[in-house]
Amino acid sequence: MSAMNSKKIISISVAMGLVMAGLLLMQMLWVRNALTIKETAFSNDIQRTFTKVMQRINKLEAYSAKNRLHKMMGAPLIPAGPKASIVNGEIIKHFNYKGDSITFNLVFPSAFNVIPIFDNPIFDNPEFSYAQIDSIIQSELHHNNIYAHYRFNIFEQKGSYFLFHDPDINENKYLEKAYAFPFVSNNQSRHLYLMVYFPKERAYLLKEMSLMLFLSIIIILAVIYLFSYSITTIIKQSKLSDLKNDFINNMTHEFKTPISTISLACQALSDDDMEKSPELYESYISIIQDENQRLGSMAEKILQTAIIDKGKLKLNTTLLNVHELIQEVVHSNEMMIQQRGGKILTDLQARHFIVNADRLHLTNLLYNLIDNANKYTFENPEIVVSTKNDGDCLSISVKDNGIGISKANQKKIFDKLYRVPTGNVHNVKGFGLGLSYVKAVVEKHNGFIGLISQVGKGSNFYIKIPMDYTKTTCAE
């Protein structure tokens, strides 16, 4: 990417990052404010609910006071405190009240502190009253659609005593975080409070907000994804724009040379001052034909790439002798390689070399691989084209002694328009279309293409194509 584009992308990325951070911060603040509002609403619901709870407990106090009076007269309404008995080897407490059997799993000594401070008729039978208060609380909470887990205790403020020892909840938790509701019977001698603690209040409220939280998370993830996608797309588009500009410049240069050569040949043929001879005509016509063929080949490559981009690459398959095809392509390139002081050899070891393939595309594929091997070997190229069988696949490799390809470039080598950097050497011609076309042809045949290369030690492109691509797929 150019320096200008890089600066623009950095500026856009920073701006989008700040906007995204702002949106995420606002979303988090919104969730936090929503949770605060939910907590306030929950607190108000608890206050409203326990107003009704304390009214019902007041009735229980009145009923207990009446029971104490009847007890003094010998006919209590509430049974005496539960007696101990053993069930399955465990000491428990139990009693029957109004036909309902209630079992308390309370191991002796009793967990309730029955001391004078709690000399309230409601605690003449603390186990019974505790169960009744629990029932009242649960009933009223469910009536108001509150299903949060709770614990409660009775606290005497003047002496800092709790009626019930709760092993699961520290008494400080009750004093710090519990809701406190005074008993109606409080007077100067009694300072009793119902302490209700919701140990999982935050989790309960978050669960109540689960839909909103889920949508918030989806929105946050969507914003992050869109941000990442946008930045990635901008970078890709910038790189593609640079590649396109390089391609246009390179294409202009590539086309300019044969066009200029044809133009000069035509001028020479039309110049009246030059002597015309059959040999001269034949020479210029040969030049024009060669350059015209070169132009056609370059145009064909561009058209092939356009076809691949549109997904319209079609195969016209036939049973093909790959060894004969390789020999033809090698023979066509042999003279050009020899002129550079090199050589091209074959090592055709495959026993089965008849494949169901497209002759034209397979021929172009081999031309591209050999052409690349020749172009990227700057002195005395040595190219070996070999074959071997690999199960139901035919493996073809083109190995050279060229400059090699670094691991970083190997990841990009099959990308369209990508050309391996050659440092200060600028005589390597091409559009960067060859290998992307080769890969498309191989994959269309349900084959695989790979590369083994080391900088300074040459490259080995190998392809695997099935003997019959309609029945078999070849993998690495």
Image: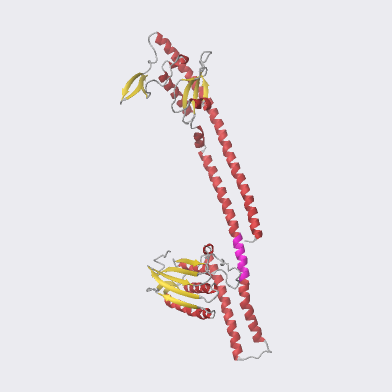
71 left or right, relative to 201 = left
Q: Position of residue 369 (x, y in %)?
A: 50, 72
Q: Is residue 359 visible?
A: no
Tell whether position 192 is magenta: no
Can you say which quadrant of the picture contains the N terminus?
Answer: bottom right
Residue ID at (57%, 39%): 31
Q: What color scheme is it?
A: secondary structure
Q: Quadrant of residue 389?
A: bottom left
- In the image, the segment drawn in magenta is 238-250
Residue at image position (50%, 80%) is 334
- Looking at the picture, how far across and down is residue 255, in whole percent? 61, 74
Classify residue 67 by image quadrant: top left
Q: Residue furthest right?
A: 273
Q: Residue at x 53, y 62 (%)?
A: 408
Camera-nearest residue between 470 and 441: 441
Provide residue 41's location: percent of width, then percent of height. 55, 31
Decide: is 440 above or below 186. Answer: below
The answer to whether residue 116 is left or right of residue 264 is left
Residue 94 occupies quadrant = top left
Judge whether residue 58 can be spotted in this image.
yes
**Is 91 drawn above or below residue 431 in the view shown?**
above
**Furthest residue in direction left, as rendered:** 88
- Residue 377 percent across, percent down from the top left: 53, 73
Q: Please name whichever residue, 395 or 295, is drawn nearer the observer in this view of the structure.
A: 395
Q: Quadrant of the C terminus?
A: bottom left
**Of 40 and 56, which appears nearest the observer?**
40
Q: Main secondary structure of the magenta part?
A: helix
